[in-house]
Amino acid sequence: MFVEPHIGRSEDHAGKGWIEVVCGSMFSGKTEELIRRLNRALIAKQKVEIFKPKLDTRYDKTQVVSHNQNSIRSTPVDFSEDILLLAATSEVVGIDEAQFFDEELVTVANKLANNGKRVIIAGLDMDFSGKAFGPMPELIAIAEYVTKVHAICARCGGIATYSFRLSTSKSKVLLGEKDKYEPRCRRCFLSGQ
Ligand SMILES: [Zn+2]
């Protein structure tokens, strides 16, 4: 489990921001991990704001919702730059489904952290074709802490890092859940291509 190495309000850490990325395939528990970290900050009475791209409307429009129904209130935004203004007074900034944001999210995350905020980003590291997804590679590069979480292969029970698309759509963005995707390991992903 990820343990924040420099959390707290001591002199050493006051005003120092940083970036955490939680990445992995679908069904790997990324959002659950994001919610776990944010809930603990909320219990500590830290000012927390959560954002997600407007196009992710799989569940409730104003909630970051993980697959186990454990949810937390969030604000849908059109552009990553909107986050700068909306998060101006928060101490902890959560961003879900980061792969769907524009490339500007990299600059936005850096600005937030440079301004002393803890930034926690969750997103898919690969799209359905196994290619890096949106701003995720750069976010991983600039983050202080990266946690890669894994799903379990729906075919063989191995460690899954791929989101295998069950439909034949070639669109990069195809919203859906267990009806459209299943987690697969490298070998089972390749055998399905
Ligand atoms: Zn497998």
Image (cartoon, rainbow, N blue to C red):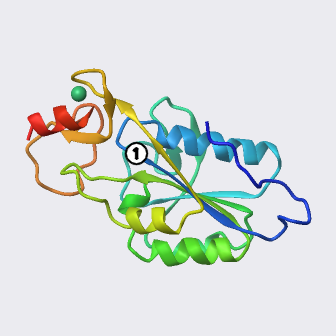
119 lies left or right of 24? right
Residue 104, image x, y percentages? 44, 77
88 lies left or right of 65? right
Instruction: Answer above or below: position of 129 versus 191.
Output: below
Residue 108, image x, y percentages? 54, 75
How many numbered dots are placed on residues in this image?
A: 1
Instruction: Answer above or below: position of 13 versus 106.
Output: above
Binning the other alpha carbons within 10 Å of mark 1 as few (below 14), some (14 to 19) or many (20 upward) gives many
Kindly identify which residue carries mark 1: 24
- Relative to the observer, which residue lies in front, 166 or 151? 151
Q: Secondary structure at mark 1?
A: strand
Residue under the point 27% across and 41% down = 162
Residue under the point 74% across and 48% down = 41
Q: Quadrant of the N terminus?
A: top right
Ligand 1 sits in quadrant: top left
Residue type at mark 1: give it: Gly
106 lies left or right of 114? left
148 lies left or right of 179? right
Residue 77 appears in the picture as rendered:
no
Residue 65, image x, y percentages? 50, 41
